[in-house]
């Protein structure tokens, strides 16, 4: 059973701070990793994906992948109240079937 | 460019009935995936279609089926509905079946009574 684990939170950070969201996965054959944001009552939207070890930056978002330790993280710099949402981590292996974590609830307070 | 559309948005069915949900992908996208999202199980992969062929299937019973048409539009069907099938059903499209970027539709909220 392939598992993707996320702390359910809520993770509460003040506006302007860095929010750090973490995800661990069990399948060493995992090849691609995704972060989605889901607002309450809405569908998930892709923030970014990463498939190589290291960091990948896109605006205020940075994804970090460490395959040896089997974790992927998402950093949100200069967090805004509009970033308050549930963040889903998803992992794909060679079969391209995605496994999603249960998500981490992020609250950014003014 | 229009996003992924799903119809209907809300549906109430009775246990034992069957239901068909529809998904129209983003123009040019040839891969359509279906997911079930519940508070208890989270987001779970149902199946993926590309070029009218099922490429992958998740761990769901045979009551869940789908198909894709030549214009890439897709339908999923659930037969003999159970109370536990109540969920948000999400469709997502991507350019290719191995595509990294996947875009979700607004979902169909199914309630089984």
Image: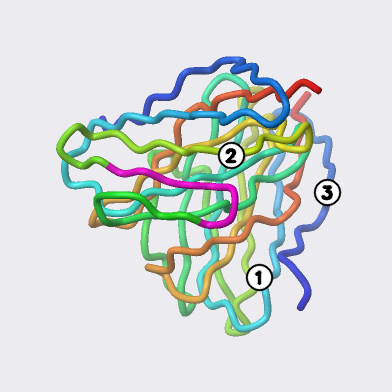
Dot label at residue B9: 3
Q: Are marks 1 and 3 on the same chain?
A: yes
Dot label at residue A77: 2
Q: Where does the C terminus of chain B fall, quadrant-wise?
A: top right
Residue at position x 38%, y 25% in the image: A5
Q: Nearer the viewer, mark 1 or mark 3?
A: 1
In front: B28, or A71? A71
Q: Do labels 1 and 2 share a chain?
A: no
Dot label at residue A4: none
Chain at tag 3: B
Q: Is mark 2 on a helix, strand or loop?
A: loop
Q: Is the magenta stretch mostly helix, strand or loop?
A: strand
Residue at position x 19%, y 32% in the image: A69
Q: Which of marks 2 and 3 is in front?
A: 2
The residue singled out by tag 1 in the image is B25
Q: How crowded is mark 2: few (under 14 residues within 10 Å), some or many (20 or more)?
A: some
Q: Which of marks 1 and 2 is in front?
A: 2
Residue A70 percent across, percent down from the top left: 23, 34
Q: Residues within 10 Å of mark 3 (few under 14, many from 20)?
A: some
Residue at position x 64%, y 45% in the image: A44
Q: Does the magenta stretch include residue A62?
A: yes
User: Seen in the image, is B47 located left or right of residue A68?
Assistant: right
> Which stretch did the figure color magenta?
A58-65
Residue A49 percent across, percent down from the top left: 44, 55
In front: A40, or B82? A40
Q: Do the residues labelled 2 and 3 touch (CB within 8 Å)?
A: no
Q: What element carries label 1?
A: loop
Chain at tag 2: A
Q: Which of marks 1 and 3 is nearer the N terminus?
A: 3
Residue at position x 57%, y 19% in the image: B40
Q: How far apart in space, not on screen, are marks 1 and 2 (Cα)?
A: 32 Å
């Amino acid at each position: 059973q392939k598992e993707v684990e996320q702390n359910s939170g809520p993770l509460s950070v003040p506006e302007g701070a860095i929010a750090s969201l973490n995800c661990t996965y069990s399948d060493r054959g995992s090849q691609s990793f995704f972060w989605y944001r889901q607002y309450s009552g809405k569908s998930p939207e892709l923030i970014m994906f990463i498939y190589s070890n290291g960091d990948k930056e896109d605006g205020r978002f940075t994804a970090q992948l460490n395959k040896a330790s089997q974790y992927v993280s998402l950093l949100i710099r200069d967090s805004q109240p509009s970033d308050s949402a549930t963040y889903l981590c998803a992992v794909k292996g060679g079969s391209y079937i995605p496994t999603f974590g249960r998500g981490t609830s992020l609250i950014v307070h003014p | 460019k229009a996003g992924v559309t799903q119809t209907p948005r809300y549906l109430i069915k009775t246990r034992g009935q069957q239901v068909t949900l529809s998904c129209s992908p983003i123009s040019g996208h040839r891969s359509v995936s279906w997911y079930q999202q519940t508070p208890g199980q989270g987001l779970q992969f149902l199946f993926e279609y590309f070029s009218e062929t099922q490429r992958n299937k998740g761990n769901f019973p045979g009551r869940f089926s789908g198909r894709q048409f030549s214009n890439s539009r897709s339908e999923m069907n659930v037969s003999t509905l159970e109370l536990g099938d109540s969920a948000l059903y999400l469709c997502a499209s991507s350019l290719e079946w191995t595509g990294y970027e996947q875009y979700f539709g607004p979902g169909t909220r199914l309630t089984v009574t």
